[in-house]
Amino acid sequence: MALVKSLKSLKSANSVFFDTSVLVAGTIDFGPPSVASLKVLGAFAREGVGPPLTAWHCCLEFYAVTTRLPPEYRLCPAQALQVLEDDVLRKWRVSDLSEAHRASFLGTLSGERVVGGRLYDAHIAAIAHASGAATVVTENRRHFTSLMRYGIRVLDAAEIAREMGLK
């Protein structure tokens, strides 16, 4: 019960957005680097609070990353699909940029001089903002600090785990 209260005490548990880095680490046990992500995603799944948010882009990245990891961690395509279907697509709110937001997003990239692969995290950040996220959970905090100008908190999995009272 205390966990449900701590989840609800987040600005809103259904406005917590998870980046690919947390989805992967919360699904595949890499040892110490995965501990916080496993705890946080496990708590959201057990307590049924939410639904948590993510981006369609994160689902695609999850599939791409998990199917090309070193063999000891790698998921076969069928396993990656099953995780996405069972644990994300059926239970989470998965968002993408609307057509109306796409042109302004590209303009923002140009105006902020975002280049190369940084555009992928910028895309995920734009989706998080458009989806109404109050908190973004990522292991790549510096790639999402631009969201802070909108009052969106950017935490890593260990920080949100502490906030949720997970040990």
Image (spheres, rainbow, N blue to C red):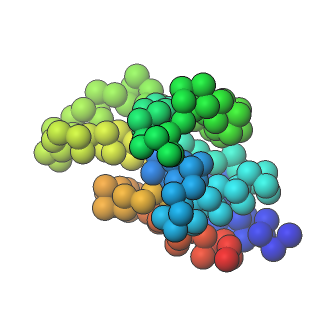
Going 74% across and 51% down the picture, which residue do you hit? Answer: 45
Residue placed most toward the observer, 106 or 19? 19
Residue placed most toward the observer, 11 or 65? 65
Of all residues, the one furthest to the top in this rendering is: 99
Going 81% across and 74% down the picture, which residue do you hit? Answer: 2
As drawn, is 80 to the left or to the right of 14?
left
As drawn, is 53 to the left or to the right of 154?
right
Of all residues, the one furthest to the right in this rendering is: 1
Q: Quadrant location of the N terminus?
A: bottom right
Give the total of numbered labels: 0
Residue 132 seen anywhere in this rendered image of the structure: no
Residue placed most toward the observer, 7 or 89? 89
Residue placed most toward the observer, 9 or 100? 9
- The quarter of the displayed image where residue 5 is located: bottom right
Going 24% across and 45% down the picture, which residue do you hit? Answer: 118
Figure check: 163 above or below 71: below
Q: Quadrant location of the C terminus?
A: bottom right
- The quarter of the displayed image where residue 144 is located: bottom left
The location of residue 38, given as percent across then percent down, is 62, 59
